[in-house]
Amino acid sequence: MIECRRCVNSTVNPTVTIDKTGLCNICSLYEAQFDPYNLAEQRDFFMSLKHEKVMVGISGGKDSISLLHVLRHRQRISPVRFDFTAVHIDFQFSDFNPERL
């Protein structure tokens, strides 16, 4: 296993590659897309976000489920490690039929 020298990515993830400078493909792409004058400030900001926890409110509909799929994909490729939890509150409305879901 080889780890990126800037983020939490490693070659354990099959989509991650480490170049000869020790950067993963995601950090390399990140550096190529941003202004080099602000790069250190931006990198410091993102590195301060290591292992964030996110709560996502969902309704159970197709939009909510799609959001969870997008977050799962982003979780795999993001240079910032994060976990998320889906939350649904059942208000016990009398006209709600969960069998339609």
Image (spheres, rainbow, N blue to C red):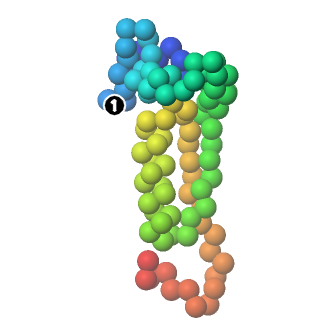
Give residue 69's position: percent from left, percent from top. 43, 54
Q: Residue at x 56, y 64 (%)?
A: 58
Give residue 7's position: percent from left, percent from top. 53, 22
- Considering the image in quadrants, where does the C terminus appear? bottom left
In the foreground, 76 or 100: 76
Q: Residue furthest bottom?
A: 95
- 25 vs 97, left or right, is left
- 65 vs 20, left or right, is right
In terms of image quadrants, where is residue 95?
A: bottom right
Q: Residue at x 66, y 78 (%)?
A: 91
Rendered position, 81 above or below 21: below
| Disc 1, SS | loop
Q: Which residue is mark 1?
A: 15
In terms of image quadrants, where is residue 19?
A: top left
Q: Residue at x 56, y 39 (%)?
A: 82
Give residue 47's position: percent from left, percent from top. 62, 25
- 10 vs 92, left or right, is left
